Amino acid sequence: MKTLLIIDVQNDFMPGGSLAVPDGDKIVPVINNIQHKFDLVVAAQDWHPQDHVSFASNHAGKSHFDEIEIHGKPQTLWPDHCVQGTEGAKFHKDLDTQRWEAIFRKGTDKEIDSYSAFYDNGHLKSTGLTGYLKEKGVSQLFLCGLAADICVYFSTYDAFKEGFACFFIEDASQPLDPNKHEELKKKMEYLGIQIISSEDI
Ligand code: VGL
Ligand code: ZN
C-alpha cells in the first residue's frame, strides 16, 4: 500500500501568510500531479486554538521566533498561525483534496506544540496516525508539504521510527530555513530515509 502523507499545505504557510514559507505555493501543482500515483492519500493540518502556547502573542514581552522553555522543553515562539476555523488554517485553494481519505489535525492542545503528524513534541500523545496507517497495511510512506525543515521533517522522522519505509519528496516540499533543511537531509539519508524527486515516484 503506497501512501502519500501531505503535511500542512495551508494558507498561513503560503507567501503572504502569517508564517510564510518562501515559495510555499510552488509545491501545490507538484503535489496535485503526483496524487494519482498513490493507493492512499492522507493529509495533516496544523490546527491551533487562539491561546496556543507556541504563539508569541500569548507570552508578554516576547517576539516572533524567540526561543523559550516550556515545561523544560525548548519552544520557538511563532506568529499566530493556523488558528482553528480561520482562513489561514484552510488548505491552499488550488490543492486537490478529492482523493484524500483522512485529515489528521495536530497542535490542538493549547499546552503543547506538535510538529509531527504522529505525536506532539513531547511524544506524550499520539494523533492515531500510526494505528490508522498500520491498519490500512501501509508499508511505503511518501511525505511532502510545509515546512520541509519543521513539520515534514518531524513527521518523516516519527514515521521512520514507527517502522515505515520513508520517502521524502523534496520538490513537493519547501523549507522555512534552507540551511537547516540541508543539515536535516543529511540526517535523514544517514538514517535510511530516501530523499527523492516527484519524478522518481
Ligand atoms: C509548522 C511551525 C509551527 C509547520 C507548524 O507546519 O512546519 N511550523 N507550526
Ligand atoms: Zn503550528
Image (tube, rainbow, N blue to C red):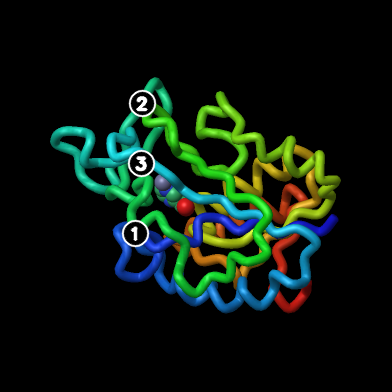
Asked which secondary structure carries label 3, the reply is strand
| Residue 184: x %, y % from top left | 58, 53
Towards the viewer: 93 or 115: 93
Q: Amino acid at mark 3?
A: Thr
Residue tagged 1? 87
Q: Quadrant of the N terminus?
A: bottom right
Q: In terms of secondary structure, where does tag 2 sit?
A: strand
Marking on residue 111: none
Q: Furthest residue to the front?
A: 98
Left or right side of 58 for 98: right
Checking the image for residue 76, the label placed there is: 3
Residue shown at 43% from the left, 73% from the top: 23
Identity of the residue furthest to the top in this view: 71
Quarter of the picture containing the C terminus is: bottom right
- Tag 2: residue type? Ile
Q: Residues within 10 Å of mark 3 (few under 14, many from 20)?
A: some
Residue kind at label 1, given as amino acid type: Glu
Please indicate whether residue 168 sits to the left or right of residue 55 in the image: right
- Ligand 1 within 8 Å of disc 3? The answer is yes
Q: Position of residue 199 (x, y in %)?
A: 73, 78
Query: Mark 2 highlights which residue?
Result: 70
